[in-house]
Amino acid sequence: MGSNCHTVCARDLTITWANDCRYWRWCCDGASYVAELIQVWWLEVRGSYDTRCLPCGNSSCEGEVSFLVKLKHNACGWNLPVKIAVCLPNGTRKEICVNLSNRPKEQWFEISAGRFKGNAARGIGTARERIAAREKHAAKEQRAAEESNAAARETDVAKGKIAAKGERATKQLDAAEDRNVAAKEEIVAKDGKRLLLERRGRRELHMCEK
């Protein structure tokens, strides 16, 4: 945009897993911090800018969105194209695919995401609200999924406890039945012994009477 250059720092971007040291590290490059990619299987970087700060009050003014990137000498895995999209406040969406495998190493270069007319930059407040609403909706869905997973885990734990209680109750019932059977057997044994003694007593009494 000629002499008017407006920058969004890396710290102001939304980078997936940016705070996980396994995938990204933050380095000081001059007066600003830059995000250095270590390894990642899902690359996603998002950002927004209030275009009301741009001197694009008429349709003859043009603007351009660019990413400033540097590939290190050992950079690899860029044989697949990178998708870059720009969403303007008026609802226009521009999307391109960029191949970084043939870009120079160890030097900064710009990746143009697209150009726009001045009148397309109007209505940023509404656009920012839409972006915020989408991010809020995504966060809400994530929380709902986490709560659903937690509820499912609690349900599984509850089912496990119920099953354990049922198993204990079954064992207790079996033990009670075993005790009842043993008691009945003991009663039968005592009755049999008593009957045997009574018969022996009668026989002895009969012999004495003779």
Image: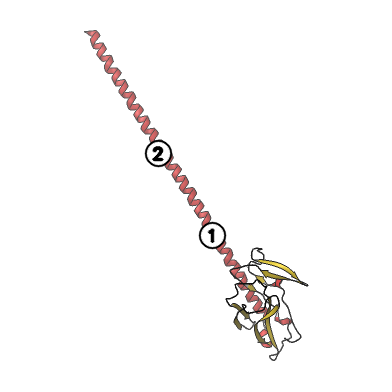
Verify CB contact (< 8 Å) between mark 1 and mark 2: no
Q: Which residue is drawn at 69% across and 70% down?
A: 35
Q: Is residue 170 above or below residue 31?
A: above
Q: Residue at x 34, y 29 (%)?
A: 185
In the rendered image, residue 71, in percent from the top left (x then y), is placed at: 67, 74
Q: Which mark is residue 149?
A: 1
Q: Which of 106 and 135 is in front in this view?
A: 106
- Residue furthest out toward the bottom: 60
Q: Quadrant of residue 126?
A: bottom right
Amino acid type, mark 2: Asp
Q: In this view, does 28 lie above or below 65?
A: above
Amino acid type, mark 1: Asn
Q: Is residue 45 above or below residue 145?
A: below
* Element at label 2: helix
In the rendered image, residue 137, in percent from the top left (x then y), is placed at: 59, 70
- Residue furthest out toward the right: 31
In the rendered image, residue 20, in percent from the top left (x then y), is placed at: 65, 63
Q: Distance between the residues labelled 1 and 2?
A: 37 Å
* Element at label 1: helix
- Residue furthest out toward the left: 210
Q: Name the residue under label 2.
A: 174
